[in-house]
Image (cartoon, grey):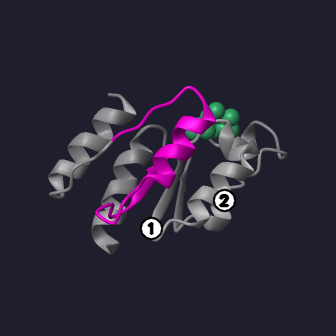
Amino acid sequence: MTARAYLGFSAAAHGFTAHCVQSADEAGIIHAVLNADASVRGIVIGAGEAVHSSVALRDALAGVRSPVIEVVACRPNQLGEFRSSLLSSVSTAVIIGAGIHGFKLAIDHLAATV
Ligand SMILES: O=C1C[C@@](O)(C(=O)O)C[C@@H](O)[C@@H]1O
């Protein structure tokens, strides 16, 4: 199952609609974050490599009023101690190492807390 499918069925199970954005470049994700309107109840973000490198994405998320759940599928510290996250300090919660299932856990967490 894909991350998009996990987000879609998990959101529907809680009565939410998931609006999924996928982008090959960082700017696409940043624009989606900046365009999130007041109807957005929460943001679930799996930022890939940008989690380690994007100050711009970190700053965009810092301005979001709704909860931000960061999902990191693998265990980056097992790939190298230098792989710290720039996003965690502005995230409400972080789910690490649960693979793609982390996206379902993120939606479940949002549903339980918003
Ligand atoms: O691109 C990726 C994938 C990743 O974001 C993950 O969710 O497992 C973890 C990052 O360390 C890596 O650079």
- Residue 43 magenta: yes
Asked whether the viewer can see residue 53, the reply is yes
In which quadrant will I find the N terminus? top left
- Above or below, comparing residue 70 to residue 101 in the picture: below
Q: Can you tell which quarter of the image residue 36 is in? A: bottom left
State the quadrant of the C terminus: bottom left
Residue at image x 40%, y 46%? 103
Is the residue marked by circle 1 packed among few (<14), some (14-19), or many (20+) residues within 10 Å?
A: some
Which region of the structure is painted magenta? 20-45
Relative to 45, does residue 68 appear above or below in the rendering? below
Q: Is residue 74 visible?
A: no
Q: Position of residue 82 (x, y in %)?
A: 84, 45
Is residue 103 found left or right of 10 in the rendered image?
A: right
Q: Residue under circle 2? A: 59
**Mark 2 neighbour class, 10 Å CA radius: few under 14, some 14 to 19, many 20 or more:** some
Outermost residue, right direction?
A: 82
Residue at label 1? 67
Q: Whole-Å distance between the Cαs marked 2 and 1?
A: 15 Å
Question: Which residue occupies 49% across, 39% down?
Answer: 99
> What amino acid is labelled 1 in the image?
Pro
Residue 56 spot, x, y in % from top left: 69, 50
Q: Is residue 17 above or below residue 94?
A: above
| Number of the label disc, if any, that sits on residue 20 | none
The reply to whether callout 2 and callout 1 are in contact (CB within 8 Å) is: no
Rendering coords of residue 54 (x, y %): 71, 46
Decide if residue 83 is on the left or right side of residue 29. right
Q: Nearer the viewer, residue 38 or 81?
A: 38
Place of residue 42 in the rendered image (x, y in percent of width and height, measured from the top left): 38, 61
Residue displayed at 53% across by 36% down:
28
**Residue found at x 34% / y 66%:** 38
